[in-house]
Image (spheres, rainbow, N blue to C red):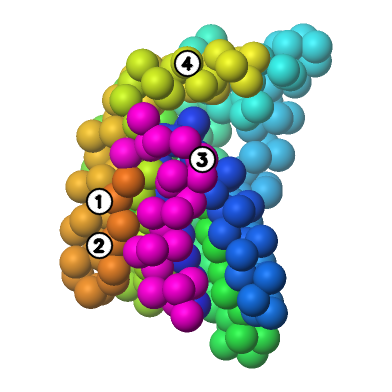
Amino acid sequence: MIIVLIGSPGSGKSTQMYLLSKIIRARGQNVKTLCLKRGFIASLMEKILFLLIYDKSQLYPLYPYPLERLLRGAREKFKKVVHLWYAINTFELCARILLLLIMNKICRLTLLIEDYIPVMIADYAYVALKLGIPIDKISKHINILIHLYFKAYPSKVVLLTASTRELIQRWYKRGRAECSRTYLLILQRTVPKLAKILTHRCDVGEIALDTTNKTVSDTLRALVQNIRYLRH
């Protein structure tokens, strides 16, 4: 079984994935958790480029990922290699997802995945917007991800949301600003629509929860009630 948690940074995905994994393990099931927001090689490429442009001390703790800083202050330099970034990231994500499918069948794992193809597509669109790249220039990468979703669609999609104000408050409680408001706006507008379209095409069950006024326990209780597999 594959359960995917998607949504904006700060909506509670990591916390709920950790708690769900504990519940599944307590029931004697094998479970693996992972994040598929970005490939390892593409992330390494971002960090290397960041270190070549900025002082090393600026990498942490303000930005857990250097991509946002590159898009803010090094657009032209990043734009020179961005098509390589797209190609590497698309290839690696496809390879990782296909490997997970094989592991899932062989080992009978329950996979809990934070972020997935709808979020990746939103990320690709955001990078193109910030760099002034026409969307048709990256359409082949988006189409690959869409086709992959139809081959590797999850058993259940959990969409966690929260108000913009609440998300920003949560970021600052963590001691950092995780992303720009432009990125947040793109996620809030596109990810729910993409998820709905893709899950409808694949007849996948979707759970949408607004965590703005919910405690962690409230959200977990709602998830367990809505995921039939966990109620057994």
Q: CA distance from mark 3 to mark 4?
A: 16 Å
Q: Secondary structure at mark 1?
A: helix
Contact, CB < 8 Å: mark 2 with mark 4?
Answer: no
Residue range corresponding to the magenta coloring: 210-232
Residue visible at 32% across and 39% down in the picture: 210
**Residue 137 placement: quadrant:** top left
Q: First in sequence: mark 1 or mark 3?
A: 1
Residue 89 in view in this figure:
no
Residue visible at 61% across and 70% down in the picture: 24
Name the residue furthest bottom. 106
Q: First in sequence: mark 4 or mark 1?
A: 4
Amino acid of disc 2: Leu
Residue on which disc 1 sits: 194
- Residues 12 and 202: in front is 12
Q: CA distance from mark 4 to mark 1?
A: 26 Å
Contact, CB < 8 Å: mark 1 with mark 2?
Answer: yes
- Residues 166 and 4: in front is 166
Residue 192 in view in this figure:
yes
Q: Main secondary structure of the magenta part?
A: helix
Q: Secondary structure at mark 3?
A: helix
Amino acid of disc 4: Gln
Residue visible at 19% across and 70% down in the picture: 201
